[in-house]
Amino acid sequence: MVFARGVRKSFGTLEVLKSIDIDVPKASVACIIGPSGSGKSTFLRCINHLEEVNGGVLLVDGEFVGYDLRDGKLYEVKDSLLCRRRADIGMVFQSFNLFSHMTALENLIEAPMMVKGLSRREATEKAHVLLERVGLGGKADNYPRQLSGGQQQRVAIARALAMNPKVLLFDEPTSALDPELVGEVLQVMRDLAESGMTMVVVTHEIGFAREVGDQLIFMDQGVVVERGTPREMIANPQSPRTQEFLSRVL
């Protein structure tokens, strides 16, 4: 579902991603861990073309997101096509990013109507189902300010699901939450994984990665230092840098 080979990204003279190779098969969960500044979130944003890559190949379901390949050369696509392709990639941010002037229900129906062309009735029916799925069936008419952080993040997950994405990207989805609210968000993510949703999760929740992840990727200073199955890698990391990092967070 996600195929990355030699992906590079720089901001000015700062090289943030240095030839990243990552494969995420369909219906699997890839968890990415690493210290702040290691390039984890930048790579996530490159997947849906919120950041343009400077080199390498990055495909989602076999296609470039922000480019077309013609005669061996890459050409940027128009914004309208980029939006349609990006609609297949759900993104859940650390800080929720809900529209504060809209209710939970309105947050969910806006994009399906504007981008997918659903009628208000279709979008509303689907939104109610998704709010029930994340345990917020009774909060449809609440504004974000009336919801806890954990509830807001669950609305954000439901909003991403409303677009029927092929893959869901999570950028440290629990790091802005009070500790007692983390569990309710992680449970929704567990349920999604069990349902077969392809997920790429940047996280500090090592327990979640161990239980739910199909692969664990440790990044540092813009490179993939080590990857493997989560339980084996957490129990017996091979790289000294991975050992050092895990000893500090476990």
Image (cartoon, rainbow, N blue to C red):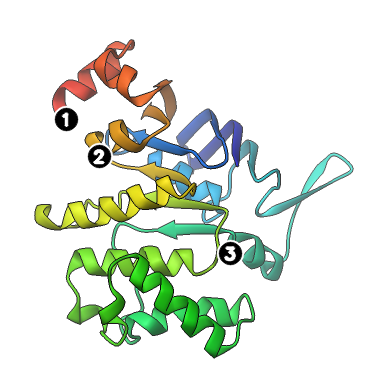
Picture residue at 58% right of the left edge, 49% below the top:
52
Closer to the N terminus: mark 1 or mark 2?
Answer: 2
Q: Position of residue 2 (x, y in %)?
A: 58, 40
Residue 26, quarter of the rendered image: top right
From the viewer's perspective, tell me whether residue 108 is left or right of residue 35. right
User: Between 125 and 28, which is closer to the camera in this rendering?
Assistant: 125
Residue 204 circle label: 2
How far apart are the alpha carbons under marks 1 and 2?
A: 8 Å
Closer to the N terminus: mark 1 or mark 3?
Answer: 3
**Above or below: residue 233 compared with residue 250:** above
Verify CB contact (< 8 Å) between mark 1 and mark 3: no
Task: Determine crowd level at label 1: few under 14, some 14-19, many 20+ residues with C-alpha closer than 10 A.
Answer: few
Amino acid on which the number 1 mark rests in the picture: Val
Viewer can see residue 221: no
**Above or below: residue 139 compared with residue 68:** below
Circle 1 residue: 249
Residue 84 circle label: none
Q: Image quadrant for the C terminus?
A: top left
Q: Position of residue 58 (x, y in %)?
A: 62, 40
Amino acid on which the number 3 mark rests in the picture: Ala
Task: Determine crowd level at label 2: few under 14, some 14-19, many 20+ residues with C-alpha closer than 10 A.
Answer: some
Task: Determine crowd level at label 3: few under 14, some 14-19, many 20+ residues with C-alpha closer than 10 A.
Answer: many
Secondary element at image label 2:
loop
Circle 3 residue: 87
Secondary element at image label 3:
loop
Amino acid on which the number 2 mark rests in the picture: His
From the viewer's perspective, tell me whether residue 179 is left or right of residue 165. left
Residue 40, quarter of the rendered image: top left
